[in-house]
Image: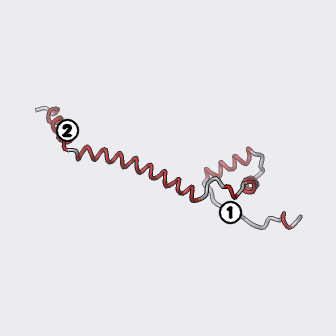
Amino acid sequence: MSEEDIKSKIISFRVSDHDYGAVEEASRKHGFTSVSLFARSATLSCNTSELVHSPLDVEINRLWRRIEVLTAALETLTARVSIVLDPVTWADLLVKSKLASPR
């Protein structure tokens, strides 16, 4: 065995149970006998100069999705508050409630 073939370095990272299950299934689907062999093959076959998503890209996407959720919540809150603060709408509601209530 040449010095180049000796595997002396370790790369380790954590995944969720769900992600591990998906990787395990993919490794079997592609005929690998272990998740480790699959991960090694996937990592070494990746052209590292052309990574699809950098950690910064992932974080920016996560923050963008959060901003979209917060924007939608703010729009809902604004609509609800405007009903309460709009004097015409508030007055209309009072008149309607007085007309609807039995005397």
* Quadrant position of the N terminus in the picture: bottom right
Left or right of 16 in this view: 35: right
Query: Among all residues in the image, which is located at the extreme right?
Result: 1
Q: Nearer the viewer, residue 73 or 12?
A: 73
Residue 39: quarter of image: bottom right
Query: Nearer the N terminus, badge 2 or badge 1?
Result: 1
Q: Nearer the viewer, residue 93 or 57?
A: 57
Report x, y in % for residue 43: 72, 56
Q: Nearer the viewer, residue 57 or 13?
A: 57
Q: Residue at x 73, y 53 (%)?
A: 42
Report x, y in % for residue 50: 68, 55
Q: Are marks 2 and 1 in contact (CB under 8 Å)?
A: no
* Quadrant position of the C terminus in the picture: top left
Left or right of 19 in this view: 4: right
Query: Among all residues in the image, which is located at the extreme left?
Result: 103
Instruction: State whether residue 74 is above or below residue 89.
Output: below
Distance Cα–Cα, label 2 vs label 1? 63 Å
Pointer 2: what residue? 93
Pointer 1: what residue? 12
Element type at marker 2? helix
Q: Residue at x 57, y 56 (%)?
A: 57
